[in-house]
Amino acid sequence: MNSANQERVVKQISSRSLNALRSFLETSLESRLKQSQQNSPEKAIIQLFQKISQNVPAYQSFLAEHQIDPRSLSTIADFQTLPRTNKQNYIQKYSLNELCLDGKLESCDFIAVSSGSTGKSTFWPRFIGDEYQVATRFEQIFYDSFQADRGHTLAVVCFSMGTWVGGMYTANCCRHLAAKGYPITVVTPGNNLKEILRVIEDLAPLFERVVLLGYPPFLKNVIDRGIEQEVLWQQYNIKLVMAGEVFSEEWRNIVMEKIGSINSCFDSASLYGTADAGVLGNETPLSICIRRFFANNPDATQEFFGQSRLPTLLQYDPLSRYFEVQDGTLLFSGDNGIPLIRYHIADTGGIVGYEEMLQYLKTKGFDPIAELSVKNNRGIRTLPFVYVFGRSNFILSYYGANIYPENIQVGLEQPGIQNWVTGKFVMEIKQDPQANSSFHIAVELVPGLSISEGLKNAIAFSIYTQLIRLNSEYANYVAPQYQLPHTTLYEFGNQEYFPVGVKHRYTR
């Protein structure tokens, strides 16, 4: 590249960075979220499609391969006829340069790595402007839920640091909020348990609130280990930001009790994030309040979501991430370091309009807005909802009944059981030499707890009781003599089922 072209590129990147920063810093959260009501998400996604089809070489080739002339698409109905993209037919097929805007990897300033839970790890370039979009999701949580505009907040990033997407992305977004004027100080111990507890001991007393950000099972481990070391969590006004796994409302109740929270809707929030496109949606006080209603009403859960398991329920900004549902799975489109159109990551779920959700709840005699308003006047946004069950390949079928990890989790989170187990388990269907199937669950015990027959029976019965309560298919399809799962207990860190430091899978 000659010096004139180099100078032009430098100016373009500098201009993009400055414009993105100004937009983020100078636009209030209220104004940002109102834009989705004042502007058409359908019109915006068509404009994004035209931009990508004109400026991203990989997508140009993808359209040409499918014999699609982008100039022929002008309506949302046209858009919905586009073939969906995924990691196999798009991301892995083209070079990083081809996937980026104008075919230039230098248009991005950072590269993260996916976890590789479905195969080989993938590189995901992004531009700092992409982080500002995602930082707005964090801003919703820190402002609406935690009131972090009032008083000094310590944000403790407990996601793994390094090339993996969670830690660095989270730390950067929290710092962007600080740059916007929120009194937030960030510390990054990563998933080093000893260092996290040292940070809490030395720094937490200096702040009005402490926010722990990490994977749900790990944060529970942090809290439990802190209790063992006589950390008085109740003194520090602890808040939790979580991502990466679906958890039950029983689990939330347990953890909230441990940290002394009496207001779960405002003291915790989960993010729906991917390495592919950052954060797509987030729990809000409203979505948590509604989810807790469904958790207490399994029949309504089955009726509304079409399954016995409880999905993660979030709200999203359709101008930032445009969701669609196809064949029961979610597609999303959005502008990123690698812009994505109708991208499919195999998450089962659906979308629900704001008014549609409230109208359904009204037929059940429940008013979440009235319930929330008693506690706080923040957190009620007229944004659409997206619900996520997770990957369909984490489901087992037994006698025609679908068994979900979420059903098992609830059994392990009951009083008297949850203190014995880490929350990790593996479920699998085994066959004997006569090809008879049986349902087996391996359960990890907390460190130092010895295996006993009484312990095994109590855990197995708790799982069975909740499975029958929550999963009507299991209760009706599986003959009673086969309903009690074969439960095997393993000591903490068992190499076959629960190796330390490896991303856990709940099915085999």
Image: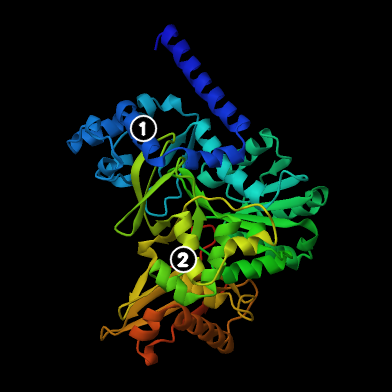
Q: Is residue 319 visible?
A: yes
Residue drawn at the location 48% of the way across and 55% of the way down: 354
Can you say whether 77 is above or below 181 in the image? Answer: below
**Disc 1 target residue:** 47
Using residue 343 as the reference point, say whether residue 249 is left or right of it: right
Q: List the single residue furthest toward the left.
A: 67
- Residue 343: name its quadrant: top left
Whole-angstrom CA distance, mark 1 to mark 2, is: 33 Å
**Residue 366 marker:** none
**Disc 2 target residue:** 360
Residue drawn at the location 58% of the way across and 63% of the way down: 368
Earlier-in-chain disc, 1 versus 2: 1
Q: Is residue 490 visible?
A: no
Label 1 crowd bin: few (<14), some (14–19), many (20+), radius 10 Å = few
Residue drawn at the location 42% of the way across and 54% of the way down: 117
Count the labels in the image.
Answer: 2
User: Depth check: 110 or 242 in front?
Assistant: 242
> Percent from the top left, x then y, of residue 255?
65, 66
> Percent from the top left, x then y, of residue 341?
34, 40
> Percent from the top left, x then y, of residue 438?
36, 83
Using residue 181 as the reference point, say whether residue 97 is left or right of it: left
Q: Are marks 1 and 2 in contact (CB under 8 Å)?
A: no
- Residue 73: name its quadrant: top left
Say which element carries label 2: helix
Amino acid beneath label 1? Gln
Say which element carries label 1: helix
